[in-house]
């Protein structure tokens, strides 16, 4: 190594002398240093003037428009130093939100709760219009449906005493607490109204005869109490879903109560179409039209208004269920209106409306679960809201 040191030192001294002969270094527009010379740079080539030996005394950036690459290399053979555009992501693509732990029994609870509410409204309509067939069918169905709702709810809670524990407090800001008290008020009233239908089977004399004479007015009052709480029972489940962090449920908070109210009316009307002859099914047909209008309007809104968050309601199993619900609803209403003189047509229309209510409730349920499992439905809307707050432009207005 010592034999090479003088040669290296001589080269360095010659290089230093050449730099000193041509003046100090100056920065170029591109940020590189070039030697100052007595003549201007070559305008055509962008290079510094050459000295007498034909060598360039300094360099200027040849093409500042070309992207810089890692390692100082230009052109090919390097990595371009540019930050890639950010996209939504999560840790290894895992969900950002914990998907609801609810199973199919909660979707069934949504249906039976709506059926109980709609049936009690049908019973009240039959009671006020003097249609005993509609009144009886509505009261019995309401009791059976609210009983099934209690079974599904307790099954989801795991232990029956948990339902009792929820009654120790009343929290108006909690849809779950409010719904528990609604169900508690509705259930006994619906039960008393249904038991009153058995008054005709009791003997007319003796203690049982006295009970038989007292049951109809008591059932009349209980039926009206159940009907008064029925709208809250039909819609609180929609508020409950919208109060969660599940993206496609939370964003659809204006539509879910409307959908559930319409579905409850349609399912109650279905009970009347199945139980009553055509001559006595007029109130049921009117309920079917009103319920179908609300249900179709709300379902159309959640599939078109929510932007990206409408996708879970249009694709996969939720999309198939909601499309089936629309078709069955339309078929049920058409059958109820066109088959006014046919008992078979009325029964088919009622079955179609019941099937539509089941398909709609399960479609809404599974649509929300799908949106919680895909991180895209959490990240992208959040970024859109942040950008809208920063720019003052509402993305929903586009």
Image (cartoon, rainbow, N blue to C red):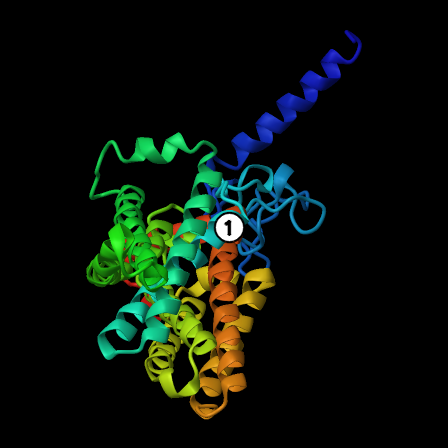
391 relative to 111 in the view: left or right: left
Q: Would you place residue 5 above or below residue 375 in this image?
A: above
Which residue is rendered at x = 27% and y = 49% of the image?
182
Which SS class for mark 1?
helix
104 relative to 280 in the view: left or right: right
Which residue is rendered at x = 40% and y = 72% of the image?
266
Q: Would you place residue 354 above or below residue 167 in this image?
A: below
Q: How many labels does the image show?
A: 1
Viewer-proximal residue among 260 and 191: 191
Q: Is residue 383 visible?
A: no
Viewer-proximal residue among 182 and 103: 182
Which residue is rendered at x = 37% and y = 74% of the image?
133
Residue 239 sits in which quadrant? bottom left
Residue labelled with disc 1: 369
Q: Would you place residue 228 above or below residue 127 in this image?
A: above
Where residue 126 sits: x, y (%)? Answer: 29, 74
Viewer-proximal residue among 28 and 337: 337
Q: Is residue 267 visible?
A: yes
Q: Quadrant of the N terminus?
A: top right
Residue 184 sits in which quadrant? top left
316 relative to 365 in the view: left or right: right
Viewer-proximal residue among 148 and 302: 148
């Amino acid at each position: 190594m010592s034999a090479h040191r003088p040669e290296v030192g001589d080269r360095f001294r010659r290089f230093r002398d050449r730099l000193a002969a041509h003046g100090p270094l100056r920065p170029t527009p591109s940020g590189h240093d070039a030697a100052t010379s007595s003549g201007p740079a070559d305008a055509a080539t962008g290079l510094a003037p050459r000295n007498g030996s034909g060598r360039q005394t300094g360099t200027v950036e040849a093409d500042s428009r070309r992207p810089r690459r890692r390692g100082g290399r230009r052109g090919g053979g390097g990595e371009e130093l540019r930050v890639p555009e950010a996209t939504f992501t999560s840790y290894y693509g895992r969900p950002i939100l914990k998907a609801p732990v609810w199973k199919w029994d909660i979707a069934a609870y949504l249906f039976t709760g709506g059926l109980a509410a709609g049936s009690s409204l049908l019973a009240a309509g039959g009671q006020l219009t003097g249609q005993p067939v509609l009144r009886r069918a509505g009261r019995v169905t309401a009791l059976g449906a609210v009983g099934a709702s209690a079974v599904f709810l307790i099954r989801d809670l795991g232990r029956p005493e948990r339902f009792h524990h929820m009654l120790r407090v009343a929290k108006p800001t909690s849809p779950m607490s409010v719904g528990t008290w609604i169900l508690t008020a509705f259930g006994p009233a619906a039960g008393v109204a249904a038991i009153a239908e058995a008054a005709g089977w009791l003997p007319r004399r003796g203690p049982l005869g006295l009970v038989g004479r007292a049951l109809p007015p008591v059932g009349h009052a209980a039926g009206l109490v159940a009907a008064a709480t029925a709208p809250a029972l039909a819609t609180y489940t929609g508020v409950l879903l919208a109060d969660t962090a599940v993206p496609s449920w939370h964003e659809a908070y204006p539509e879910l109560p409307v959908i559930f109210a319409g579905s409850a009316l349609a399912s109650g009307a279905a009970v009347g179409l199945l139980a009553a002859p055509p001559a006595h099914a007029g109130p049921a047909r009117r309920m079917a039209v009103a319920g179908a209008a609300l249900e179709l309007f709300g379902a159309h809104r959640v599939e078109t208004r929510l932007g990206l968050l409408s996708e879970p309601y249009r694709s996969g199993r939720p999309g198939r269920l909601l499309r089936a619900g629309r078709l069955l609803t339309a078929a049920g209403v058409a059958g109820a209106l066109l088959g006014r003189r046919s008992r078979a047509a009325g029964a088919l229309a009622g079955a179609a409306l019941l099937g539509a209510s089941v398909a709609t409730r399960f479609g809404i349920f599974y649509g929300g679960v799908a949106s919680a499992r895909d991180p895209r439905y959490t990240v992208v809307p959040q970024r859109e809201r942040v950008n809208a707050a920063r720019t003052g432009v509402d993305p929903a207005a586009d």
